[in-house]
Image: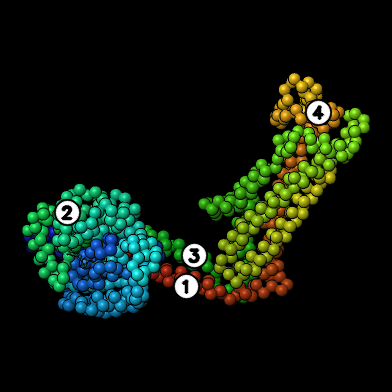
Amino acid sequence: MEIKVASDTKSKSKSDSKGAALASSYDSQIRPLLDAVDRLRNLKVMQEGIQLPTIVVVGDQSSGKSSVLESLAGISLPRGQGICTRVPLIMRLKRDKSAVNPQMHLEYQDKIIQTTESGITAAISRATDEIAGSGKAISNTSLTLVVKKTDVPDLTMVDLPGITRVPVQGQPENIYEQISDIIKEYISPKESIILNVLSAAADFTICESIQMSRQVDRNGERTLAVVTKVDMAPVGLYEKVMADDVKIGLGYVCVRNRIGDETYDEARVEETKLFETHPLLSKIDKSIVGVPVLAQKLMQIQAASISKCLLDIVKKINDKLSFNVHELDNMPTNLSNVADAMRAFMKVLSCMKETLKKILIQREYDEYPDDFNMHGVARIVEMLTQYSKELPLNQVMISEGEFLMEEIKILEEAKAIGLPNFLPESTFKILLKRKIDEISHFPIEFVKKVWNYIEDVVINVLTRHSDNYPQLQSSMTRAAQNLIEKMKKQSCQVVQGMIDMERVGAYTSNPDYMMTWCTLMEKQDHFMDLLHDHSKPSILDLGRFGKVKVDHLRQQQKEMAEKAFDLRMRMIAYWRSVILRLVDGPALHILYNIQKLVETEMDNEIVDEIAGHSGTGLERMLEESPSVAGKRDRLRKSIELLKESKQVVGRIMDRIALLDD
Ligand code: GDP
Ligand code: MG
């Protein structure tokens, strides 16, 4: 798609006939584009998240933003020292040859206020007060000013509050944040053209507005600078503009706005005179000075930007439209009898079950590709891994205190030092019970954590699938929560049972136990050696179970130490079986119960709650909830608007295709 843009002012002034030709091509090609965009803006497609090409005026406070707009429009706007522009002002200038007298009106908050050239300032101030209050506060609700005149450039621009660091009296403390949020919202979309208004006297490199626009447009590709007040600070301006220290991609235009009581025509004459005669200002190339040049440039940039964005806009409108149509299709139809309601309810249930099966059993996460918290099996496995790491596997490493002292104490308590090599069963049990008690909170915590997580996931899925029946949501949620609470309690009981069994019984059929114990006991002679012979090192190496200090045992009875050693080695060997059981048991239990929950329990519980003996849930489904009705309404309106927008762009695209032929 190629759109010819009226060329610059120089060629226009060369010959009148060429000028007329350009004007007519402008009328036939550019104006319809502008009208189309204006129409879209009027339709408020921006509310649908579709950005339109827009010229956004930014600048530090009192840099001359409103004055530049005035110069372009040839009408007076509120201006002066301090903050005058307190709401975004969308200014639509329309060249209209038939408008004998300038016509203008304000649009805001669904109101249209007709006004006149002399009344405009007061009308804008009134509207601003109405939107933002009569103080110095600002607001993000925009105000649209439409101006139709014979001699204005066709432009749509947004004037924004100027950036100020220091709140004045009556302004909120965070005025800077408020203003910069509004500015960012307008200049961030890549469809926006940034018109950066800089006072000639300012150091461009430290202007707030430059810093802000560079955040969203690093290389200045969509930034145009207007330098105002050249009459007040002509010295060094030429050099500043030439140096372009602040990277303005679309170039600079220097202007002199109206001063005092001058008329706009007088102001233009004075401006021309200034740039022709001033010893410093006359050095600046004529292609970058004066309000007419600025107007011409803006129109070119605007047309180019529109033609560049149009295809994208068409695509976005289409995408949004089909998305909304799909949403509307998926909204529930109004249910008229209990059978309908039952069908709809069963559908919600089966969708829920399907999703839960996928994420909690089958490891299929296509419905939540980026929401990792909903990748159920993966998250549960993660919790399991973490849990098994928390459980200490090696009794040598975890036992606190000096090596074997705990065992010796237990043996002394048991007073069972009778026959050599005889190890009373009770001492092992006592030790085992102690060790199990130390870790008994881990399995319970693990089970609770998993069920809490499952509750999150289930509620999330339930809410999503029952979104269209808010009247059921709270009872369904309650049913699910009750059920999960019940299952959590049961799990805790089962796992507590597993712990109790470990505490009481000491049994394993795992051959690893005997093997490990035998390997460890091979060290016993060496251990006794170390105790007898004080010249030997005082560290015993237990291979993969680590090293221990033994010098404190040298003053103990040798027979006692020997028995304690045996006791500890049995514990080390046996402990491995205990831990494996305490990991595998709860894990299998949890996996089995999740399956039970998803496959049968959840359905039963929810059906009981909604349609069971006392449930009136299905009847409740027959009345549509206000929020669903609201959503349906919103979707319908949005679809209507998008269809209309589609027609608007469709017509303009057809025209462009015709012109291209
Ligand atoms: P805004 O806060 O950026 O909208 O700034 P205004 O447009 O309200 O201008 C601030 C002041 O600077 C006003 O008093 C204007 O009259 C004055 N001003 C703006 N442009 C020029 C200019 O080119 N020359 C001179 N001498 N004064 C200007
Ligand atoms: Mg202003």
Q: Nearer the viewer, mark 3 or mark 2?
A: 2
Mark sitting earlier along the chain (3/1): 3
Residue 311 sits in quarter:
bottom left
Q: Position of residue 123 (x, y in %)?
A: 27, 77
Front residue of this view, candidates 480 and 649:
480
Residue 511 sits in quarter:
top right
Q: Is residue 358 visible?
A: yes
Q: Residue beneath label 4, please?
A: 555
Q: Residue beneath label 2, please?
A: 237
Residue at image x 20%, y 72%? 75
Q: CA distance from mark 4 to mark 2?
A: 95 Å
Front residue of this view, candidates 119 and 490:
119
Residue at image x 17%, y 65%? 257
Element carrying mark 2: helix
Q: CA distance from mark 4 to mark 3?
A: 82 Å
Element carrying mark 4: loop
Q: Residue beneath label 3, please?
A: 327
Q: How is the image coloured?
A: rainbow
Q: CA distance from mark 1 to mark 2?
A: 57 Å
Q: CA distance from mark 3 to mark 1?
A: 12 Å
Please, is residue 333 above or below residue 490 in the view? below
Element carrying mark 3: helix
Residue 229 sits in quarter:
bottom left
Q: Are marks 1 and 2 in contact (CB under 8 Å)?
A: no
Q: Residues within 10 Å of mark 3 (few under 14, many from 20)?
A: few
Residue type, label 1: Asp
Mark sitting earlier along the chain (4/3): 3
Residue type, label 2: Leu
Q: Please give left or right for residue 78 compared with residue 188 in the image.
A: left
Q: Nearer the viewer, mark 4 or mark 3?
A: 4
Mark sitting earlier along the chain (4/1): 4
Q: Nearer the viewer, mark 1 or mark 2?
A: 2
